[in-house]
Amino acid sequence: MRLPCLFLCLPILTGSVFKRGLVFGLVPAFVQLFIVFPLLQHASVLGLNFGYTTPFFIIFLNLIWGLAAAGWLKMIGG
């Protein structure tokens, strides 16, 4: 069921490095905020039990990671 969702991202993944970085960064951020925190950590959705700035830090750090991953893929020719 989740596999068709990946096919929706295929046209974005051929775009600029910035767009690829956004996709690479936002997907794990949303997984952590909406699946890992509520189901595995038994915290509230978005991890608000850890503090009100938690979602901002998660999204920001995952965006940095996504941009670095997209830049690395472009650099190695991927």
Image: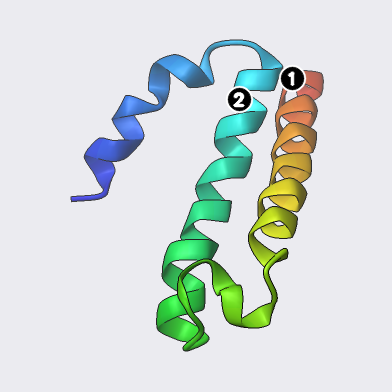
Q: Is residue 41 visible?
A: yes
Which comes sooner in the sequence, label 2 or label 1?
2
On screen, residue 53 versus residue 48, left or right, reads right
Where does residue 63 sit, x and y in percent of width and height?
A: 71, 41
Q: Residues within 10 Å of mark 2 (few under 14, many from 20)?
A: many
**Of helix, strand and loop, which one carries label 2?**
helix
Classify 15 as above or below 7: above
> Hey, what amino acid is under mark 2?
Arg
The residue located at (43%, 64%) in the rendering is 34
| Residue nearest the viewer, comparing 34 with 75 | 34
Q: Name the residue tied to disc 1.
A: 74
**Of helix, strand and loop, which one carries label 1?**
helix
| Residue nearest the viewer, comparing 64 with 46 | 46
The residue located at (42%, 69%) in the rendering is 35
The residue located at (74%, 20%) in the rendering is 74
Where does residue 40 sit, x and y in percent of width and height?
A: 46, 84
Where does residue 18 sit, x and y in percent of width and height?
A: 69, 20
Q: Name the residue tied to disc 2.
A: 20
The residue located at (75%, 32%) in the rendering is 67
Disc 2 from disc 1: Cα separation: 10 Å
Where does residue 10 sit, x and y in percent of width and height?
A: 40, 22
